[in-house]
Amino acid sequence: MKRYFLTGVAVLIPLVITIWVLRSVVNTLDQTLFLLPLSLRPEALFGFAIPGLGVLITVIVILLTGAVAANLLGRRLLTLGEDLLAHIPVVNSIYNGVKQVSDTLFSGSGKAFRQVLLIRYPHNQSWTVAFQTGVPSGEIADKLSEPHVSVYVPTTPNPTSGFFLMVPRSQIIELDIPVDVALKYIISMGVVDPISGKPLADIVVPPKQHN
């Protein structure tokens, strides 16, 4: 009975969590429907809500924005809009900062989150997995006594939050594993092997040799 129960839990937990995450994403994106006038919302048009309609509208808006921005006229309009935002106090600093981060993360030639590292954190007696995001520059680099790298240390099991650190280059270890495998290792709290990508429980460990 205990074996059946544990097997059922092992099967259902990933399924339930996946459904919960997808439902949360759909519910969040469906909030975009509140931007529409009351007369254009599904409740007014059809008499009932349509789950997932916000996801569809969001995807369509993203695709249309990308299509417009990809042509010559769209790039000119985008440049004019950015010039306008650049002259608005506070707004310009927020927009420029977010844009720089976005361009770095989604650029095909960018190096952010391309290198998986091992660093000592939160103290010298322990290690954690981190991602290199760049290198310090300007006055920050001048104030440091040796070359450093900028790293992001994600939290477990939610890697979207974490810590930004600047670590001496001499104290990092570069890992030759893909970023997605490292993320699985972090999200699973070390249950998934970072080399094979399989649960550690499925990996046969040779018995300890006794002299």
Image: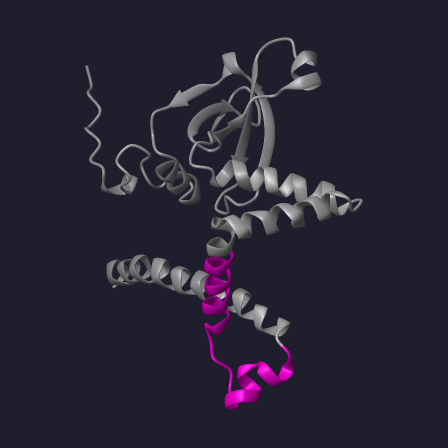
- Whether 58 is drawn above or below 194: the answer is below
- Whether 118 is drawn above or below 97: the answer is above
Determine whether, in the image, residue 144 is placed left or right of residue 202: right
What is the x, y in percent for residue 25? 49, 62
Q: Main secondary structure of the magenta part?
A: helix
Residue pictured at 55% horizontal, 47% vertical = 75
Determine which quarter of the picture holds residue 2.
Answer: bottom left
The residue lying toward the viewer, choosing from 91 and 1, is: 91
The residue lying toward the viewer, choosing from 42 and 60, is: 60
What is the x, y in percent for residue 188? 40, 44
Determine whether, in the image, residue 10 is placed left or right of residue 106: left
Determine whether, in the image, residue 144 is placed left or right of residue 16: right
Residue pictured at 60% horizontal, 27% vertical = 165
Q: Residue furthest top?
A: 145
Is 73 one of the magenta-colored residues? no
The residue lying toward the viewer, choosing from 201 and 182, is: 182
Q: Quadrant of the N terminus?
A: bottom left
Determine whether, in the image, residue 42 is placed left or right of residue 210: right
Whether residue 190 appears in this view of the structure is no
Residue pictured at 36% horizontal, 59% vertical = 13
Q: Please tell me how many numbered marks the rendered image carries.
A: 0
Q: Specify the segment rendered in magenta.
A: 37-65
Residue pictured at 54% horizontal, 65% vertical = 28
Q: Quadrant of the C terminus?
A: top left
Whether residue 64 appears in this view of the structure is yes
- Whether 178 is drawn above or below 173: the answer is below
What is the x, y in percent for residue 3? 25, 58
